[in-house]
Image (spheres, rainbow, N blue to C red):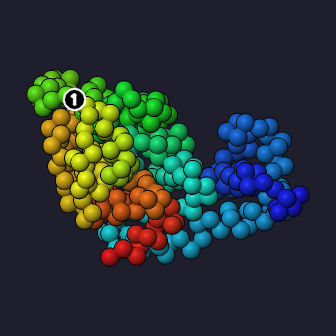
Amino acid sequence: MQKQNMTEELINDYTRIAYYYHKAGFTQEEIAKKMSMSRQRVNRILAECIELGIVQIQVVNINENYMDIETSLEKKFNLKGVYVINNLIEKNIHEDLGIAAGRYIGKFIKDGDIIGFSRGRATAALVEHMPLLQRENLTVTQLLGSENNDRENIAVDDIVHHFAAKLQAKATKLYAPVLVQDSELQKSIIKEPFFRDAYHVVKNCNVAIVGIGTSSSQVEHLSPLYAIKKAELDNITGEVSTHFFDALGRPVVPTFRNRIIAITLEDYLNIPVRIGIAGLPVKADAIYAALKGGYINVLVTDLETAKILEKKS
């Protein structure tokens, strides 16, 4: 088979299979299940990837020389760590970032840690693909309330549940919505004993694993919840765990802040390790603002976005 005779879809499938096997560490059996094909076909495609040059050009060198840009970003933003991937297919960016993060963040997790999660596709992918770490006495919790309109796999309470099951961690849930109808209801909920007990765990998190939202994504995400108007989000560049900020990372407090049920900004910023998983150039401004504001101190992103961040003054 010659590469010029292959469709773009077929090339993408070959490249993804090569990436899963050579870089993500999946077995051929796992790839076969993931790609809905036989293990024998996976084996044949892997052999053909070498003949076609896909492995040599696009996979073997996928992280070569990225240490320079990772180190550059660490120094520029005073970060504890940066991990850069060369995402192969844009539509799979969240899964690719989740896979990469799952194999990277183990260095930041130790016995007895309390790990807090936000919602999102990348954080959900991290949990799905995270290797079985040999850690003891882990606790996992949600950093914000839940939403009924979230897809099951990206909802924060589902992420917490799946992480706990996978790593045999204790799960603590808030059992509250992320946004309520008025401030009086919010005050009532956070005074309840069940919430106070759960929030005590949240406040003592050692590690936060979060996504980074953009202004446009927050309009789409929050507008269905009690009709938040787009104008209320106009001066917002990004969001982390329901905390909003402008282009320089300065906090922005919207009028509906007192209706949100989530970790406070002060308590969030006191978490020692705050891992942000986000990519694509469309999110570069929000990621940059999150870095400037100190909302994250570990970053997992893609190469193109990393290059944009490195050039930003």
Look at 43% across and 70% down and name the residue there.
308
Task: Identify the residue position indicated by label 1 in the image.
Answer: 180
Tell me: 239 left or right of 50. left
The number of numbered discs placed on residues in the rendered structure image is: 1
The residue closer to the viewer here, 258 or 172, is 258
Q: Looking at the image, is 109 positioned above or below residue 5?
A: above
Tell me: 14 left or right of 127. right
Q: Residue furthest right?
A: 1
Instruction: Tell me the element at label 1.
Output: loop
Tell me: 43 left or right of 237. right
The residue closer to the viewer here, 222 or 309, is 222
Q: Looking at the image, is 136 positioned above or below residue 294?
A: above
Which quadrant is home to the C terminus?
bottom left
Which quadrant is home to the N terminus?
bottom right
Can residue 198 be seen by looking at this rendering? no
Res 221 → quadrant: top left
Provide residue 122's location: percent of width, then percent of height. 47, 46
Provide residue 168's location: percent of width, then percent of height. 45, 32
Provide residue 310's location: percent of width, then percent of height. 41, 73
Circle 1 Cα neighbour tier, 10 Å, few/some/many (<14 / 14–19 / ≥20):
some
Look at 84% across and 42% down and name the residue there.
40
Q: Looking at the image, is 54 positioned above or below residue 136?
A: below
Provide residue 299's location: percent of width, then percent of height. 40, 59
Look at 41% across and 58% down and name the residue there.
283
Q: Amino acid at mark 1?
A: Val
